[in-house]
Amino acid sequence: MVCKEELLITCLHVLTEKITMDIAFIFSGHLSTKEATQAVINKLIHNLESEGTITGYTFSSIVREMATVSEPVREACSALYENIQQIYCLKLENEGFSQESASAIALLMTASIEGAMMLCLTQKSSQPLKTIGTLLPSILKTV
């Protein structure tokens, strides 16, 4: 019999792959990190405003609370954020940012978008994503 934790981890792996592929696809279709980031945020805003939720993207945010109970669940959640940061970091490095700066900015981007998604859900408003959608681009000016 498969336990709930194993099912959760399997779901997280599938979700990680889907979200990573989705973000990688968006980033590969844009020349700059600034444009790609705006496209990701716009997609999240569109999903929230048209569907009332950010399906898939928010599941990991909810599940992360369970990660404190189980190391395998924590590792599965961590993999998603690491994958997202890697996509951002590589794009920034390709634009001329140093590895250190790219890594720091990728972390900031991941935390900002994740935090904005949680605020959107709790406030039942897309305004937090819209706000970071206007603020993040100023950080993404190339060197």
Image (cartoon, rainbow, N blue to C red):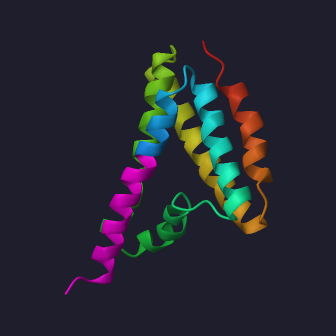
Looking at the image, residue 125 sits to the left or right of residue 57; the answer is right
Front residue (pair 49, 13): 49
Point out residue 27 in the picture as x, y percentages from the top left corner. 50, 31
The residue positioned 66% from the left and 34% from the top of the image is 38
User: 139 or 52, which lies in front?
Assistant: 52
Name the residue rendered at 61%, 59% in the picture.
Answer: 54
Q: Residue furthest bottom?
A: 1
Where does the image place residue 116, in percent across and percent down from the top left? 68, 52
Q: Is residue 115 above or below residue 106?
A: below
Kindly indicate the quadrant of the structure image that contains residue 68: bottom left
- The region drawn magenta spans 1-20
Q: Is residue 23 shown left or right of residue 8?
A: right
Task: Look at the image and say whether residue 137 sits in the magenta stretch.
Answer: no
> Residue 47, image x and y in percent?
65, 55
From the viewer's perspective, is residue 24 above or below residue 92?
Answer: below
Q: Do we see residue 75 in this rendering? A: no
Q: Give above or below for 84 relative to 70.
A: above
